[in-house]
Image (cartoon, rainbow, N blue to C red):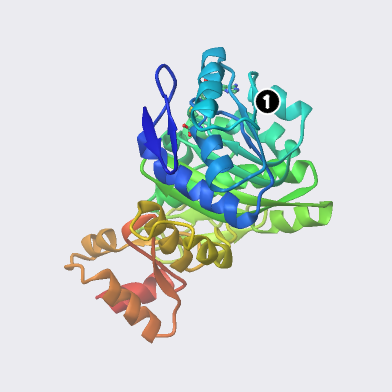
């Protein structure tokens, strides 16, 4: 028997990962803060996610689905164990279910890649889509060919590879939604431990979709000096030359280059999380990071410059003093997000 949040579930014979508690804590806080009324837990396993959303977030209509009949038996038992009698349990392929029915909010938490479920989810979700992807190697560029196959975009294994993963996944979802005249608006996007997670609001309309695509683009990365530059828009105009060191660049994308979070929503959600929890720390860090794509790894830059790294806070306050925007990032404990060009950052460090 497992106790998590305010529910208890029997996880015998079904998938249950205690490390995903943070992911579920945040999911419950978001569903609650957004006032979700209908939620599909499309890959339910023990049912713990849907049961927590019903009980802790008070979502009225919760549908729990799993393709495995034994998982569905376990979900029904676990609902009874928590005295819940008003949830629907379905036992079919998530794609088939989403192709037949519409849901206000859909949560995708499959084994590995969610890629094959993005198209049906983009049409089926009316207002919100929450997605977990555990295929971080393809998303972050460590398994390049698999990343290209799954997400039809080129990921690169850069120093900011965790954010690369989030932006490749977000880009794939935004493009999938644009195909059905919808716009995906990121609410909270993070990468931690072994997975990437995105939460999005959906707006209808071809014009909305066009606007979303304006924030798609490419990143030109130089593996020589670690610098990069952004190219906005779906058509890639790559110079092939690094503007810092003159070396050859590689291009990643198309990927999402717009904001990753709705900061007001994050600040409001914080009060629904235990201040001592990992979930609270993670959402707080996300709410404080500036909306600038990618980050510098402070230690790696200093190693390249052959200097001893000072404290990250010191570099951030120096950048702020010089009129740049700068913050820490949840992606990396020694990461620095800033709008300062790399040359200016290096002058400040050296
Ligand atoms: N969401 C769960 C949680 O928070 O504990 C974990 C889900 S687990 C990673 C994935 C589940 O998806 C498994 O129980 C598996 O039986 C189910 N599954 C696999 N393929 C599926 C499909 N095509 N449609 C629906 N469920 C599927």
Q: Residue furthest right?
A: 206
Instruction: Please give left or right for residue 223 compared with residue 229 in the image.
Output: left
Residue 96 in sight in this render: yes
In the depicted structure, whether residue 190 falls above or below residue 193 = below
* Label 1 secondary element: helix
Residue 48: % across, % down: 49, 33
At horizontal 54% and vertical 16% (from top left) the residue drawn is 73
- Toward the viewer: 111 or 146? 111
Q: Which residue is mark 1?
A: 95
Instruction: Please give left or right for residue 77 compared with residue 61 in the image.
Output: left
Residue 11 lies in quadrant: top left
- Toward the viewer: 218 or 283? 283
Cβ(mark 1) to ligand 1 < 8 Å?
Answer: yes
Density class for disc 1 (Cα within 10 Å; few <14, some 14-19, many ≥20) is: some
At horizontal 48% and vertical 69% (from top left) the residue drawn is 290
In the depicted structure, whether residue 307 falls above or below residue 226 = below
Instruction: Please give left or right for residue 132 compared with residue 338 in the image.
Output: right
Count how many numbered circles sit on residues in the image.
1
Q: Residue furthest top?
A: 69
Residue 181: % across, % down: 80, 46
Residue 313 lies in quadrant: bottom left
Residue 194 in sight in this render: no
Residue 350: % across, % down: 24, 75
In the depicted structure, whether residue 341 falls above or below residue 29 = below
At horizontal 43% and vertical 33% (from top left) the residue drawn is 8
Residue 347 lies in quadrant: bottom left
Q: Specify the quadrant that holds the N terminus.
A: top left
Q: Residue furthest front?
A: 83
Residue 130: % across, % down: 59, 43
């Amino acid at each position: 028997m497992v106790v998590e949040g305010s529910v208890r579930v029997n996880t015998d014979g079904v998938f249950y990962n205690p490390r995903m508690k943070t992911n579920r804590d945040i999911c419950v806080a978001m569903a609650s803060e957004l006032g979700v009324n209908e939620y599909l837990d499309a890959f339910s396993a023990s049912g713990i996610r849907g049961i927590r959303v019903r009980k802790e977030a008070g979502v009225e209509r919760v549908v729990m689905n799993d393709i495995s009949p034994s998982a569905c038996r376990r979900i029904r038992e676990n609902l009874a164990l928590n005295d819940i009698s008003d949830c629907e349990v379905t036992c079919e392929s998530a794609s088939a279910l989403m192709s037949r029915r519409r849901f206000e909010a859909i949560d995708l938490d499959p084994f590995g890649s969610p890629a094959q479920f993005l198209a049906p989810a983009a049409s089926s979700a009316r207002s919100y889509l929450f997605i977990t992807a555990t295929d971080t190697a393809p998303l972050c560029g460590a398994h390049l060919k698999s990343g290209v196959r799954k997400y039809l975009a080129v990921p690169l294994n850069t120093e900011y590879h965790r954010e690369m993963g989030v932006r490749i996944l977000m880009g794939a979802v935004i493009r999938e939604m644009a195909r059905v005249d919808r716009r995906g608006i990121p609410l909270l996007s993070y990468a931690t431990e072994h997975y990437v997670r995105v939460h999005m609001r959906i707006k209808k309309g071809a014009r909305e979709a066009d606007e979303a695509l304006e924030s798609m683009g490419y990143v030109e990365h130089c593996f020589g000096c670690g610098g990069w530059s952004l190219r906005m828009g779906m058509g890639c105009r790559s110079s092939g030359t690094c503007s810092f060191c003159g070396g050859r660049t590689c291009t990643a994308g198309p990927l999402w280059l717009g904001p990753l979070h709705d900061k007001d929503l994050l600040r409001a959600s914080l009060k629904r999380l235990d201040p001592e929890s990992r979930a609270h720390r993670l959402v707080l860090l996300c709410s404080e990071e500036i909306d600038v794509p990618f980050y510098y790894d402070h230690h790696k830059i200093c190693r390249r410059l052959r200097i001893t790294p000072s404290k990250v806070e010191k570099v951030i306050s120096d950048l702020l003093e010089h009129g740049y925007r700068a913050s820490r990032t949840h992606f990396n404990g020694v990461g620095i997000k800033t709008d300062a060009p790399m040359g200016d950052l290096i002058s400040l460090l050296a």
